[in-house]
Image (spheres, helix red, strand yellow):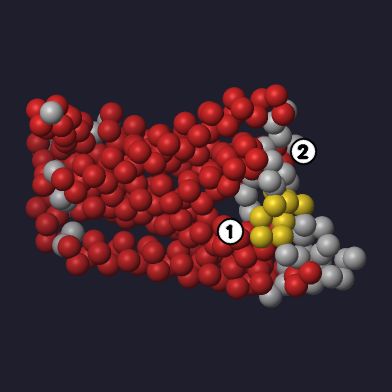
Amino acid sequence: MRGENQSSVSEFLLLGLPIWPEQQAVFFALFLGMYLITVLGNLLIILLIRLDSRLHTPIYFFLSHLAFTDVSFSSVTVPKMLMNMQTEHLSISYPGCISQMYFYILFGCVDNLLLAVMAYDRYVAICHPLYYTTIMKEDLCVLLVAGSWILSCGSALLHTLLLTQVSFCADNIIPHFFCSLPILLRLFCSNTSVNELVIFTAGAAVVILPLTGILVSYGRIGASILKVPPTKGIRKALSTCGSHLSVVSLFYGTIMALYFSSSSSNSNDNDMIASLMYTVVTPMLNPFIYSLRNRDMKLALEILFRNIVFTK
């Protein structure tokens, strides 16, 4: 039984969230509502940025990509989780599981890198305002976004290719609501030291390095503000910093919770709670954070609603 390889594993069983049957309907409605808010809220941000010419700036260009990534990130896991809760059809095919893991890593990495890119943009806007338009040219913005996607695709592809080279055992039960890479590693019969090494090194590249860049950027922003009283232009740039810092705190806070949950005695349940925060709650809150804490976004939203009312 332990010697069976991956060709004998045609599907996996996702046990899902530890919810009592009588609570399934309540949690299904809750998570469905949260998912719809995530999709509609982030699509609204993309729409506002495209329609309002005042938002055609680098920071909102990056924000539109972040919103698209958040929608995609939630869509990788939540629809399958909702279907399992409603139909109790817990199986997922082997290709479906590998694909879900690939896109989960992909969009998670893009989120990390985009947050770092946005921090760099704020650093240039506040610390070098006179050279902002010269530095943050359209070509550089496109290059930064394209680089984020390429690096993320490479990281996700590397994990996926390594995963397909090892042998699965007969046990195909995944005690989670999606195909998580660390949990899949526990189902292997063969040596996973290479996979674990890649997880460690790639994790440092796409999590620690972007976080370091964010901290350095905001450290220099803070030092610059303390030295020179903020002008009107810098105050306007600072208005987006609060939103970005809130998203960064929420995003990396859940990552840290996900990391530290693995060392606790009840790691499976803690891991699922942290994963829910990471994949469901954080993408849902991001549109609210940028809408309520950002003057430009609120103004664009008011204009859009006003135009809709008057056209009727």
In percent of the image, x 72 and y 29: which residue is there? 21
- Residue 237 visible to an observer of this rendering: yes
Write down the quadrant of residue 226 in the picture: top left
Q: Quadrant of the C terminus?
A: top left
In the displayed structure, would residue 86 be above or below residue 180?
above
Q: Nearer the viewer, residue 202 or 302?
A: 302
Q: Please identify, in this view, whether the residue under mark 1 or under mark 2 is nearer the observer.
A: 1
Residue at 37 percent across and 63 percent down: it is 148
Residue density around tag 1, few if under 14, some if 14–19, many if 20 or more, within 10 Å: many
Q: CA distance from mark 1 to mark 2?
A: 25 Å
Type of amino acid at the residue the image marks with label 2: Ser
Q: Are marks 1 and 2 in contact (CB under 8 Å)?
A: no
For this orientation, the residue located farthest to the bottom is 165
Foreground: 101 or 217? 101
Q: Secondary structure at mark 1?
A: helix
Camera sees residue 124: no
Q: Considering the image in quadrants, where does the N terminus appear?
A: bottom right
Return the residue at label 2: 265
Residue 101: give its label: 1
Q: Nearer the viewer, residue 266 or 6?
A: 6
| Residue 182 relative to residue 188: left or right | left
Sequence-wise first label, 1 or 2: 1
| Position of 185 relative to 239 (above/below) | below
